[in-house]
Image: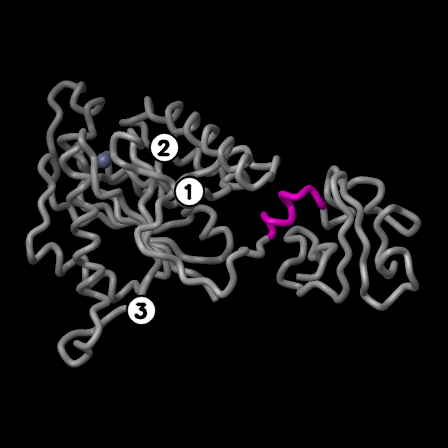
Amino acid sequence: MARRLLVVSAHAADFVWRAGGAIATVTRAGGQALVVALSYGERGESGELWAQPAQTVDRVKAIRHEEASRAAEMLGASFHCLDWGDYPLEAGREATEQLAALLREWAPDVILTHPERDPFNPDHPVAYQATERARLLASGSGVASAFQTAPPAEVLAFEPHQSELCGFSPTTFLDITPVFPLKQRAMEAVASQRYLVAYYTAMAERRANHARRISGDRTIQYAEAFQRLLPQVVRELWTRTWQNWRGWGWPPCTRRRGAPAWWRGPGSKWSPGAGRRGGPARSGAVRMTTSWSTRSWSGSAPARYSCSPCRTPPPWPW
Ligand SMILES: [Zn+2]
């Protein structure tokens, strides 16, 4: 099922730096992404445009719209600006209801927005508050007869500019390595804030370092950090994903670059059909030796955990 992502951005381009990789990840997997900017950031985040002589608010807004729309398109998302004005951004009753109506209509699976605090920006916390109020209005229970509701969504804050000073503590790292070239192009499309490209590239590299440390997956080169604002409901504590077993250094696919010789065929250290402790082969049983342990499993892996480029099933049944 195609997933729907909603990104609520206080200013026109906030989403590019903080969630560009997440957006591209969703859309590349066949999902849909909508970016809603509450303002163009025409006063507070368009300094480079105001350096041009005889500049006007309308022109600044038009340029910001063009830049943000192009960046969103590169990431596979739609861009919509509510144009509430910035510095200060204000979200009264009417504005909140407008956002709630949008949430009901779009019915996202995941909502990304700013964290609750930002001691250096008056608008980012307002965007958080507006999103939270709209989400609660759109997902209220027991009022089905009063107004339409949207299904519950997962809610995460994307990483702010000065993480620690905003009380941001990551709970989720997203590997954006495969889509980073797209994010880079989208960042470069925002010419009015080009000075941020190097900053957020460095941040993605730093977060990748943390993600590698946590997962053991040495292939992660770029990552985005998020903080869950609602607890996650799971059926098991170990999330069984491609990243998990890939991170343990067991390449699943003989065609995958770097697949070790022992994985490539009969007679190698690992071979399908070998029984436990070298005993008689059983159908579907596997035995694998890694550098630090020997593990055995039997059964076959579900296709959904197969190698995404070539559909080869992974070497151990979940
Ligand atoms: Zn902003």
Q: Are marks 3 and 1 in contact (CB under 8 Å)?
A: no
> Magenta: predominant secondary structure element?
helix
Q: Residue at x 11, y 54 (%)?
A: 95
Q: In the figure, is residue 16 to the left or right of 104? A: right
**Residue position for label 2:** 189
Mark 3 nearby-residue class (10 Å; few <14, some 14–19, many ≥20):
few
Kind of residue sitting beneath label 1: Met
Vertical relation: 99 (above or below) 60? below
Colour style of the rendered protein structure = one colour
Mark 2 nearby-residue class (10 Å; few <14, some 14–19, many ≥20):
many
Q: Residue at x 43, y 25 (%)?
A: 202
**Residue position for label 1:** 74
Upstream in sequence: badge 1 or badge 2: 1
- Which contiguous range is marked in magenta? 242-250
Taking depth in this image into account, of 150 and 162 the one nearest to the observer is 162
Q: Are marks 1 and 2 in contact (CB under 8 Å)?
A: yes
Question: How far apart are the two marked residues, 3 and 1, measured between alpha carbons?
Answer: 28 Å
**Residue position for label 3:** 151
Q: Residue at x 27, y 36 (%)?
A: 167
